[in-house]
């Protein structure tokens, strides 16, 4: 009987308008997942037919049907499950989704396949596999069996210093400037005629290094030359304002700036940011699972991160909109 049913299966192209969704379908599809299915259909074609019953109601393939509508498709491939009873269909709707969830991954093989796809071509979008870039990075890292740590050679502190303030190092497409973020000429040398679409910066927190940054007492760090706990609230606001103003000056309209700050001085960062940017987009908190050395507050209160749009965004949410104008902050 099973063999007979399998032999009778045939693919028929039907109009999307003649297919209805199943109101008892418990499976949900986010807009993001639908967009992923759209990308998959564009890349591979409609390779998985939609299953329908005798009433042209979808049994399996609601996500594919929604993706087909987004793509503006008139017809889709379908398979009619005419031999199943309504009771069997109601069970199959659940089984089709649940049984797929029971599958697992051989992560060593998965890592090999993903690595192969990444190496094909710079223009190949590996996310059409359904895995996002951060997920892929973790899979490849786990396959290596250890964290991808940089090998940092020991520094001879008695050797002559090579890099001097004002020096610009060009490393392929990358540029490293040795200079002050408070001086316009530093950013002018670094950026030239280009402007940044995003800034990701970690300014000094105006917190003394001694007593706050340590490695169980075995590691000692030098104090920062500025904003290492010696500034008043007003001085630190002015310090941040100068740095942020230059960041905005050398950024495009609609750019987004991510700025790290210790929780003690989030108020100063907010005050300085309001003088430079139009919109505070978000606050991201670094949740530390393991408290560091020091006082109770330092161990349990997470670090903070403010995300602000460039002043040239002109009150638009920069992550979504582009600015029509691009005036420069003074």
Image: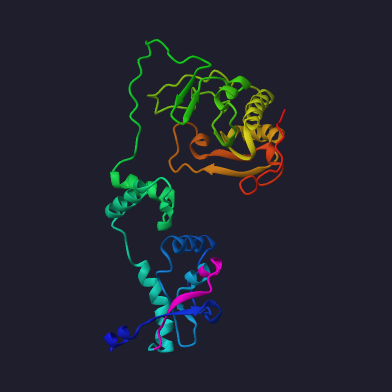
Q: Is residue 76 magenta?
A: yes
| Place of residue 264 in the rendered image (x, y in percent of width and height, measured from the top left) | 59, 33
Residue 281 vertical placement versus 77 (above, below): above
Q: Looking at the picture, tell me which residue is in the foreground, 206 or 113.
A: 113
| Place of residue 243 in the rendered image (x, y in percent of width and height, measured from the top left) | 62, 27
Asked whether residue 44 appears in the rendered view, the answer is yes
> Looking at the rendering, in which quadrant would you find the C terminus?
top right
Q: Is residue 295 magenta?
A: no
Asked whether residue 181 appears in the rendered view, the answer is no
Magenta segment range?
68-82
> Looking at the rendering, in which quadrant would you find the N terminus?
bottom left
Which residue is drawn at the image coordinates 70% and 32% (left, top)? Answer: 328
**Residue 329: quadrant of the picture:** top right
Q: Looking at the picture, tell me which residue is in the foreground, 19 or 208.
A: 19
Which residue is drawn at the image coordinates 62% and 49% (left, top)? Answer: 320
Which residue is drawn at the image coordinates 41% and 55% (left, top)? Answer: 131
Residue 330 vertical placement versus 40 (above, below): above
Q: How many numbered marks are there?
A: 0
Color theme of the render:
rainbow
| Place of residue 313 in the rendered image (x, y in percent of width and height, measured from the top left) | 68, 41
Q: Looking at the picture, tell me which residue is in the foreground, 233 or 199.
A: 199
**Residue 45: quadrant of the picture:** bottom left
Residue 29 vertical placement versus 15 (above, below): above
Position of 68 with respect to 236 (left or right) is left
| Place of residue 129 in the rendered image (x, y in percent of width and height, measured from the top left) | 40, 57
């Amino acid at each position: 009987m099973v063999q007979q049913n399998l032999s009778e299966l045939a693919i028929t192209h039907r109009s999307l308008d003649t297919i209805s969704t199943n109101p008892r379908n418990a499976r949900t599809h986010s807009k993001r997942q639908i967009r992923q299915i759209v990308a998959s259909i564009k890349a591979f074609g409609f390779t998985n037919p939609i299953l329908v019953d005798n009433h042209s109601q979808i049994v399996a393939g609601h996500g594919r049907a929604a993706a087909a509508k987004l793509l503006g498709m008139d017809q889709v491939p379908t398979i009619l499950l005419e031999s199943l009873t309504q009771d069997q269909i109601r069970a199959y709707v659940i089984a089709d989704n649940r049984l797929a969830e029971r599958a697992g991954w051989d992560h060593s093989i998965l890592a090999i396949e993903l690595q192969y796809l990444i190496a094909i071509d710079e223009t190949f979008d590996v996310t059409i596999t359904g895995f996002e870039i951060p997920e892929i990075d973790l899979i490849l890292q786990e396959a290596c069996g250890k964290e991808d740590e940089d090998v940092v050679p020991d520094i001879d502190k008695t050797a002559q210093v090579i890099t001097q303030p004002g020096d610009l190092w060009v490393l392929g497409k990358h540029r490293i400037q040795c200079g002050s973020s408070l001086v316009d000429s530093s950013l002018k040398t670094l950026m030239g005629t280009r402007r940044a679409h995003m800034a990701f910066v970690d300014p000094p927190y105006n917190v003394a290094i001694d007593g706050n940054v340590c490695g169980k007492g075995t590691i000692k760090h030098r104090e920062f030359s500025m904003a290492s706990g010696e500034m008043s609230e007003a001085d630190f606001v002015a310090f941040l304002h100068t740095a942020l103003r230059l960041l905005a000056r050398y950024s495009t309209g609609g750019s987004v700036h991510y700025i790290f700050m210790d929780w003690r001085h989030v108020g100063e960062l907010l005050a300085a940011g309001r003088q430079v940017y139009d919109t505070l987009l978000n606050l991201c908190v670094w949740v530390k699972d393991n408290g560091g050395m020091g006082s109770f507050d330092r161990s349990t209160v997470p670090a903070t991160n403010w995300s602000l749009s460039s002043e040239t965004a002109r009150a638009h949410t920069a992550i979504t909109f582009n600015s029509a104008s691009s005036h420069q902050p003074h």
